[in-house]
Amino acid sequence: MPAEKTDFQLIEEFRLGQLSSFEELIGRYSEKAFNLAIRITRNQEDAEEVLQDVFVTVFRKSAGFEGKSSFSSWLYRVTMNAALMKLRRNKHTTATINIDDVLPQINLKLVERSSEAVDLDKIALRAQVVTVLEQAINKLPEDYRPVFLLRDVDGLTSREVSKMLGLSVPAVKSRLHRSRLMLRRKLARFFREYKGIGDEPLKRAGNY
């Protein structure tokens, strides 16, 4: 069985006119690129449009790909840029975030600390927390939001995020830290209204 071709080999074949090589190359990363696009746009239709734009960009610019970085990193940067452009065109776009994905320490365990809490109270609190959290994430600066989503939602490492966004690792950590602090400020007043929660879980949200 022949060894699987490398990304660079497929690019070289595509440059020579083999369209099937381009299709194979895109097929390797289309799912991950789509997942990234939908994380940023928070809308399936927008993410699909972003993916089509990405394919066109890669098709046109692959001849200039020099291999200084991996093809996947380059593709993800193209996807990120296209998704951010889509966001700028759709200022009304809002995020729908899974609270357990974003800040694991902010969950039902916080409510369970109070012996007076009942199931309905927990459900109501969780719904309110999700709403407040989504609003806070939507208000993060455009430079910070992708870092936060990739790092805390997708679970990528700081180094992976730095390669994807073309930032230094210290810059990624700085933006992530500031994003978490911004969310903490937004949520602090909300959590102080509930007995026994306090600021401790929110302080942990500012740690790396």
Image (tube, grey):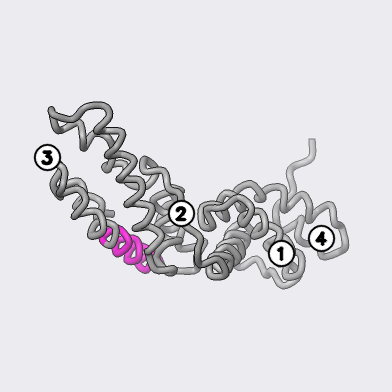
Mark closer to the chain start, 2 or 4: 4
Disc 3 residue type (three-letter) = Gly
Q: CA distance from mark 1 to mark 2?
A: 27 Å
Disc 4 residue type (three-letter) = Phe
Mark 4, secondary structure of its residue: helix
Q: Where, quadrant-wise, is the C terminus in this rendering?
A: bottom left
Mark 2 or mark 4: which is in front? 2
Q: Is residue 162 left or right of residue 32?
A: left
Mark closer to the chain start, 3 or 4: 4
Q: CA distance from mark 2 to mark 3?
A: 29 Å
Which residue was labeled with disc 3?
A: 196
The circle drawn on residue 95 is 2
Instruction: Report crowding for label 4: few under 14, some 14 to 19, many 20 or more residues within 10 A (C-alpha).
Output: some
Mark 1, secondary structure of its residue: helix
From which residue to which does the magenta span run? 168-181
Disc 1 residue type (three-letter) = Val
Mark closer to the chain start, 3 or 1: 1
Mark closer to the chain start, 1 or 2: 1
Which residue was labeled with disc 4?
A: 14
